[in-house]
Amino acid sequence: MTAATGTVARRLRRLPVDVWFEPLVILVVGAIFFLWYARTTFTSTESAQLEWAVLWGTIVDHVILTVTAAAIVLVIAIPLGILLTRPRLTRLTPIAVGIANIGQAAPAVGLLVLFTFAFGTGFRTAVIGLVVYAILPILQNTIVGLRQVDRRVIEAARGIGYSGTRTLIQVELPLAVPVILNGVRTALVILVGTATLSTFIGATSLGTLITTGITLFLPKLLIAGAVLVALLAMIIDWLGRLVELVATPKGLS
């Protein structure tokens, strides 16, 4: 073993296993899929959706749908979670969590279809449904993360003259980051998978490949859609893990 190889090996050992192992899995699965894609002969019906330009557009649409919903969930859930941990509003926590839990309690397809009666079909309705479905993990983890911060640490910060806002930004949130980001990762993976169901209400996603494959009994479309959704979920989960690793204070990682 050379010195350079030994250095790389030592660095890998210091990293959490999922940080370097998950991308290896993604690369292997991706390589197998694209090898299969390049060597498989598709029928005219399959080619209409699996031709690269069309397939790439479907992937982009799926990512845009997921990212849009995720951005809205973050803007709503994290500030709301912070507010619900403040002394004056903490009594409202059970009500807010109960309302957010409606999204998880209801079947995803039923929830999306239900919203079509109010908002019609298409991208906007799909985003609304995804936001409602994915808000609970981030909201709950934000509340749990902030509540688990040691009260003595908060009191020490206030004792040296920190304001409530400064204590929140410089003490509470950094200590709650690992738990909050874990909720974000969970929500993102949920969004990637649930976004496939948006095809039932007229929004383009990789779910179109899956539903068409099932309806017309075209296994190649079904395989392509399922594998690509799985790859997207793994990629987003890994990127979220990297952000979590970087954002977590060194003493907590």
Image: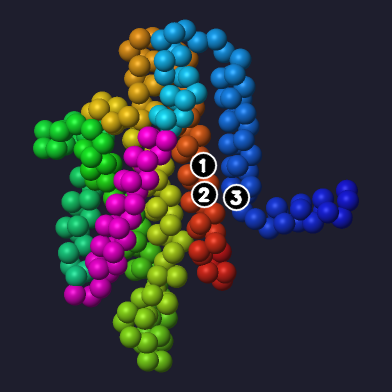
Secondary structure at numbered mark 1: helix
Residue, far front: 53
* Amino acid at pointer 1: Ile
- Residue toward you, 102 or 192: 192
Badge 1 crowding class, 10 Å Cα cut-off, few under 14, some 14 to 19, many 20 or more, is some
Residue at position x 53%, y 69% in the image: 249
Determine which of the numbered discs, if any, sits on residue 235 in the image. Answer: 1
Report the span colored magenta.
60-88
Q: Is residue 166 visible?
A: yes
Answer whether labels 1 and 2 touch (C-beta < 8 Å).
yes
For marks 3 and 1 on the same chain, the one whose residue lies earlier in the sequence: 3
Q: Main secondary structure of the magenta part?
A: helix
Determine which of the numbered discs, if any, sits on residue 76 in the image. Answer: none
Query: Where residue 10 appears, x then y in whole percent?
Result: 76, 56
Between the C-alphas of marks 1 and 2, the distance is 6 Å
Determine which of the numbered discs, if any, sits on residue 239 in the image. Answer: 2
Q: Is residue 129 visible?
A: no
Badge 2 crowding class, 10 Å Cα cut-off, few under 14, some 14 to 19, many 20 or more, is some
Secondary structure at numbered mark 3: helix
The answer to whether 72 is drawn above or below residue 78 in the figure is: above
